[in-house]
Amino acid sequence: MMESTGALDTADDIYFAPLLPWQQGLWTQLTKRVTVQQQSLPHALLAAGMQGMGKRAFVWRLVAWLLCRQRDSHPSGACAQCESCQWLRSGTHPSFQTLPLISMPVSAENTANKEKSSSTAKDKKSAKATNNSALKIKVDDIRALQPFIYQGGQGLRICVLDHAEQMTIAAANALLKTLEEPQAQVHLFLISDSPAQLLPTIKSRVQQLALQTIEPAVATDYVTQVLGSTVNREAVGTAAIEQLIQMANGAPLAAIALAQAPWYSKRALWLTTWQALRSGKRSSVAASDYWQKQLSIIEFIQLSELMLLDMRRLCLGLAALQKDINLSAILESYQPASSAIETFANSLQQSKIALQQNVQEKFAYDKLMQELAYL
Ligand SMILES: [Zn+2]
């Protein structure tokens, strides 16, 4: 549900960030294995699970530590000072490769440039279109890694394959060959939000990192702490935090992203617009004009998807996840048919596709508001 890239902050945020509290046990176990027991880690590791559990944060941090020249004296994370750590900072580490290229954590400087260049809506849209296709990992990308993997020589070499489920079949088969011939000193990390889409032959040759379990109390404490320092206080009461975590399926980083999404505070407004459209008190053109000043169309679609999620729950006789808006009360007096919910859900999907094909935001907004009136 939440589109969190999980990457692309500054190098310091990625490689040298504090360890997430629920990852302490696994971190200690893996790093002790390397330093105390003097055993290397498995050749191929998989960090899998839904978005927002912090699996990318864990992998980038572990990669930095494995490559760090001072790791034995810095058991809790890479030193951030040595040559290796500086190479990571500048994005020029000779022993580190990552696919797809878009996943490469960037240096602070590159991030600043990127922000500058994507300041207009048009740029944002084209960046988004690039993102989608750039996630695919093709067979040529895997082949291009082979010289790096098979070069031999001294020292550790690491490859990270992010969004591993995006590999084409040919790419997966090429990777399979590599997995079957482990090279000394080479580690492969696969990351996937949708591990069910990975080929079983790949999954059987990688060892999964135990990153999926988070104690609810630990998640609550973490989300409370982070939100308490970033958003206004009233938004972070116990009930609000619990609701966020529930809506994020227990994934703390997704819960934080949800609270920080520009549309999260506009859920009640969405209901007001929906009611006004349905009763004919407001025209779809007026609603469209109004919302265009509130949120980008992509944000409005995300907001709408969340509202549909709760409508579906209520239609099934389950409780709404959102207790802080009066959706349940509204649906008691009027409940849209399941078919109407699915029709609108379908319109949201169509809008996303249209936007990738450069349909104007205003046009997409007008159309969605017309359809919302019939929900
Ligand atoms: Zn270091």
Image (tube, rainbow, N blue to C red):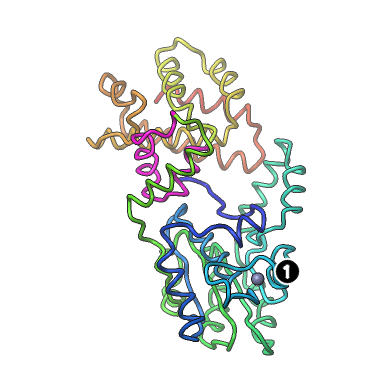
Residue tagged 1:
87
Q: Residue at x 54, y 27 (%)?
A: 367
173 to 371, vertically: above or below: below
For the N terminus, give its image quadrant: top left
| Residue type (three-letter) at the residue carrying disc 1 | Trp
Residue 206: x and y in percent read: 46, 77
Question: Which residue extends farthest front?
Answer: 73
Residue 291, above or below 239: above
Q: Position of residue 327 (x, y in %)?
A: 34, 25
Residue 188 spot, x, y in % from top left: 55, 76
Against 304, residue 171 (above or below) is: below
Q: Residue furthest top?
A: 281
- For the C terminus, the image quarter is top left
Is residue 244 a member of the stretch shown in magenta? yes
- Residue 37 drawn at (x, y percent): 46, 85
44 above or below 277? below
Which quadrant of the structure image shows residue 373? top left
In the image, ligand 1 is in what quadrant? bottom right
Q: Residue 136: within the magenta?
A: no
For the record, the magenta segment spans 234-260
Residue placed most toward the observer, 318 or 222 = 222
Frontmost residue, 129 versus 268: 268
